[in-house]
Amino acid sequence: MPLIQLKRTLDSWPLPQKGRPWLRYAGGSLLAVAALFILLNLLFPLHIKISYSPVITAADGTILHSFLSQDDKWRMQLEEGEISPTLKKAVLLKEDRYFYFHPGVNPVAIGRALVKNLTQGKTTSGASTITMQVARLLYPKERTYWHKLTEVFRALQLEWRYSKDEILHLYLNLVPYGGNIEGVKAASVLYFHQSPKELSLAQAVALTVIPNKPSSLRIGVQNEKIVAFRNKWLQYYARQNAFPAGALADALLEPLNAQRLEAPKVAPHFSYRMYRQHLGKTTIGTTLNLAVQEKVEQLAYNYLQQLKYRNIHNVAVLVINNQTNAVEAYLGSADFSDAMHGGQVDGIRAVRSPGSTLKPFLYATAFERGLITPKTMISDVPIDYAGYRPENYFGTYSGNITIERALATSLNIPAVKLLDQVGVNAFVQKLKQAEFSQIKKEGDQLGLSLILGGCGVKLEELTALYATFAQQGTYAPVRWLQEDTVVARKALLSPGAAFMVSQILTQLQRPDLPHNALNSAHLPKIAWKTGTSYGRKDAWSIGYNQKYTVGVWVGNFSGEGVPELNGTDTATPLLFSIFNTIDYNSPNQWYTAPKSIGTRSVCLESGLPVNSFCEDVVVDTYLPGISSGTKCSHLKQVSVSLDGKYAYCTSCLPEEEGYQQKWYPNHSPEILTYFVTQHLPYVSLPPHNPACHRIFQEFAPVISSPTAGMEYLLEKADQQKLMLQCNAYNEVKKVYWYVNDKLVKAAARDEPVFFQPDRAGKLKISCLDDQGRNTNSYVTVRFID
C-alpha cells in the first residue's frame, strides 16, 4: 500500500473522544508502526529472484525434458492448476491452518511458542507461518530471535506485495526435499514421474511432511521412516475429518516404493533446441504429441538396429500435423546415446543433399505456369547443357515419356529439361519463399544440377514444403509452441498444381515402391517421394495424407556413403511403418479436385489437345486458361514423289499428278539421334528433291559436341581428338563437318566424327546438312605438354 494511500486511510478514521485517551495512543502507535514499516521497506526492499529449472512440456502438459536451474537445482515452477485440492489442504492443515486469515504473522501462535520455549528453556516450537517460511527460504539465515524478527518483516513485505495464492505458490516452489531437489513439482517429477495434480493422497501427504526433515527423510533411502511419519499425519487428518474416510484408509495402506529417478529426457534434440531458442522461459509448452513421439522413437530405433548391419547408423524423422501445422514428433537421431556415430547430431537441422526430393515442387511450378500437364510428352534422351550432361539413376533412357511417368519414376533428364524451361532463378525464388535457408545464401550460385540434389537443404524445410502439397499449395511455417499462431500463410502453389502432383505421387506403379511392398497387408494411403543423393550418402522418403506429413532421412552423419543406401529400400519402409502406426486405418478419402482443375481429351502420342489426325485419345487434367492449348503435332504431312523416294518443298512441288501427300512422324532431332544410337526402328522421311536449290534457314542441325564456348585441354603427346556430333531433323540424311571453314568429313546424320586439332586457340566448328542449313559453334583448344 503506498504511503499516501495509507495516510488517507488513517486520516479518514474518526478521532478518539477526549474521555478515551488510550484510543489516541493506539492510533498513534499504529501510525508509527506503519510509518516505520514503510521506511524499512524503502531501506530494505524485497528482492525475489528465483532461478527455476527450464521445463519442456508436450502438448498435453507432460514434461518431456528438464534442465538444472542456474544454481544447479532441480526447482520446477508450478503452473496454474497444478496444485491439487488434496495437496493444498494437506499443506495448509499441517503448516498453517489460518494462512488465509492472518497478515503474514500469527500473533497467537508466536505468543504460544514464546511462552513454551521460555518455560522449557529450549526451542520446541517456531510458530512460523507459511509466509514466514517463504521469507526464510528466500533469505536463509541462522535461526535466532533477531533473524526471526527479520522473517516477520519479510513476511509482512510478502503479504504487502503478493496475494495469498501467490505466496502459497512460492512456498510450494521452494520447499526443500533433500539434495538439490526443491519444490513440490520437482519432487513429484523426480520421485513419482508425474505432475503434482496427479498425486494420490498418500503421495501428497508424504511430500507435505518431508520438508520438515529433508535431510533425514530421503525418499529411496528412508522410505519406512517416511511412511511412519506420513501415517502419523494421515491419522491427524482423519481426526480432523479433512478427507473421506475411505481415501484415508487406502492412503494408510499405500506402500512407498518411490526412489530418486532421472529427470525426463524425451525428445532430447527437440528439447535442447527449444531450450536454446527460449532462454529465460521456465516452462516451454510445445506442440509435441507424446504418444506420437514415443511411437516414432520406438519404430526408428528398432529399424536402425537392422540398418547397422549395412553400415548405416543414423535416422532422423519429423512429423507435422497438416491440420494445425504443429510439430508432433521430432527425432533428430534414432539413437541419441550412440556417440561413436554422432548420435547427438540433430539430423533434422543438418544440411544435406536432397537428391530427387525437390522434383515434385518443380513439376508443380511447371504445371501452374501452363508449361505441361500430366499427360504431356517429354523426351528422356542424353542431353548436354554447356558441358553438363545429366544421367538417369539407372543410366538408361526412355525416349518419349509422359510427365506423370517421368515424375513417378523420378527420371533426372526430364527434370533438368523442365528446370531449364522454368528457369533456375525463378525456381530458386520459389524455394526462398519456402524458407530454404541454404538456398537463400547460395541461390545465385546454383545451376541446373539444383534439381538433382546440387544444393543444401534440411529435413525440416523439405517436410514443411511437402506439407504445402497437403494443404493445397498453401505454405505456413511450422508451429513449435502452443502459443504459436499461424499468421504467415502464403500461396506458394496453386491448388490445381498441388492436386496434380498429389495424384501422381499417390500412384503405386512406380520404381520407388519398396521391394515386396505390394505384398504388405496394409499399405498406407499417402502421397510420397523418395530421394537418394550423389554418392549414396543420403536416403530420403517424405509422404503426406490429409492428417500428417512425415519426413524420413537415413544415412550417416559422418557423410560416409553406402552402396545399399537409397530412398526406396532404406527410407520408405520406415515411412510406411510410421504412417501405419500413427494414422492406422486412416480414412480412404483423398483430396478432391479443386474448381480450378478441368479435364480434356489429348493425343496419346504427345499429350497435347487432339488434332484431326490423332487416333489414340486419353483424358488429361489441366488448368483452364493456364495450360497450353497448342494442338498435337506428332505427325506432319509431307509431299513425296509417287514412288516415295523424294520429298518436295513448295518451291519444287511437281504437277498435281506427280506427287502424293503422306503423314510422317514429326520427331525432334534429339529423339532421332536417340533412335539411331539405340538402334531403334523409326519411320524416316525420304531425302529432299536433289534438283531443288532452295536453302532452308530454319531447322538447322544442332551441334551437341563439342559444347559451344567451352575450353578443351588436350594431351598433345597422346594425340587426343575431339568428337563432332549433331542432332538433325528427320529428312536429313547427311551432314558436312568443317573446322575453320575446312571440310573435315561428310558423314551420316547421326555418325560421330573425330578429328585431331593441329593447333591451339579458337576453333570454328560448322555443320552443314544436305538441305543447305548450317550451324556454327566456337570452342577453344589448349595443349598440355
Image (cartoon, rainbow, N blue to C red):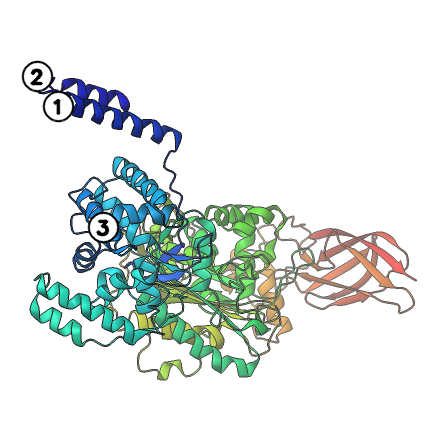
**In terms of depth relative to the viewer, which is nearer, 268 or 69?**
69
Q: Label 2 to label 3, Cα distance in Å?
A: 37 Å
Position above or below: 21 against 482:
above
Q: Quadrant of residue 528?
A: bottom left
Report if the CB atoms under discs 2 and 1 are less than 8 Å apart: yes
Residue 121 is situated, as x and y percent measured from the top left of the image, at 29, 54
Classify 10 Å Cα crowding around label 3: few (below 14), some (14-19), many (20 and above): some
* Mark 3, secondary structure of its residue: helix
- Looking at the image, tell me whether mark 3 or mark 1 is earlier in sequence order: 1
Q: Quadrant of residue 581?
A: bottom left
> Which circle marks residue 113 in the picture?
3
Placement of the C terminus among the 4 image quadrants: bottom right
Q: Label 2 to label 1, Cα distance in Å?
A: 8 Å
Q: Amino acid at mark 2?
A: Gln
Residue 475 is situated, as x and y percent measured from the top left of the image, at 38, 49
- Looking at the image, tell me whether mark 2 or mark 1 is earlier in sequence order: 2
Position above or below: 139 against 783:
above
Q: Residue at x 47, y 64 (%)?
A: 332
* Mark 2, secondary structure of its residue: loop
Q: Amino acid at mark 3?
A: Ala
Look at mark 2 in the image and give the residue it sits on: 17
**In terms of depth relative to the viewer, which is nearer, 362 or 703?**
362
